[in-house]
Image (tube, rainbow, N blue to C red):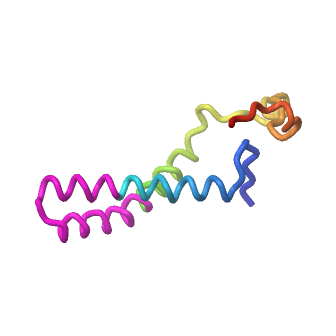
Amino acid sequence: MFVFKGLESHPRSFVKAVSWRTVGSIDTFVLGLFFSGSAKLAGAIAGTEVITKILLFYFHERAWSLVRWGHRTDATAEAAPDDEAAPEALPTTG
């Protein structure tokens, strides 16, 4: 099972991913509308783009998982400070 030991919870990361995809699709719709003048065509482009970009992102991530550049070794990961060790030491905003 994949466990990410970052500063964010999985639900927060998921909501961020959905919100980013929403912003991207709105951008695609607006650009499609601007260049074509057709809301129907812009909607078709944006709707298709959601599917294609999810698939492209998946394969992009799978390809990057094969690249070892930038990965920590087990010894390096063990020596790194644990992000969850001292949550009270993390800066807070607002």
Magenta-colored segment: predominant secondary structure: helix
| Residue 37 placement: quadrant | bottom left
Give the residue displayed 29% in from the left and 55% down from the top.
28
Residue range corresponding to the magenta coloring? 26-54
Q: Is residue 93 magenta?
A: no
Q: Is residue 42 magenta?
A: yes
| Residue 54 placement: quadrant | bottom left
Give the residue displayed 20% in from the left and 57% down from the top.
32
Q: Position of residue 73 (x, y in %)?
A: 74, 34
| In the displayed structure image, the side of residue 34 where residue 56 appears, left or right | right
In the picture, the quarter occupied by the C terminus is: top right
Give the residue displayed 16% in from the left and 53% down from the top.
34
| In the displayed structure image, the side of residue 6 where residue 51 appears, left or right | left
Q: Position of residue 64 (x, y in %)?
A: 53, 45
Above or below, 1 against 72 in this view is below
| In the displayed structure image, the side of residue 31 where residue 55 appears, left or right | right
Q: Outermost residue toward the front? A: 94
| In the displayed structure image, the side of residue 32 where residue 20 appears, left or right | right
The residue lying toward the viewer, choosing from 47 and 77, is 47
| Residue 43 placement: quadrant | bottom left
Q: Position of residue 75 (x, y in %)?
A: 82, 31
In the picture, the quarter occupied by the N terminus is: bottom right
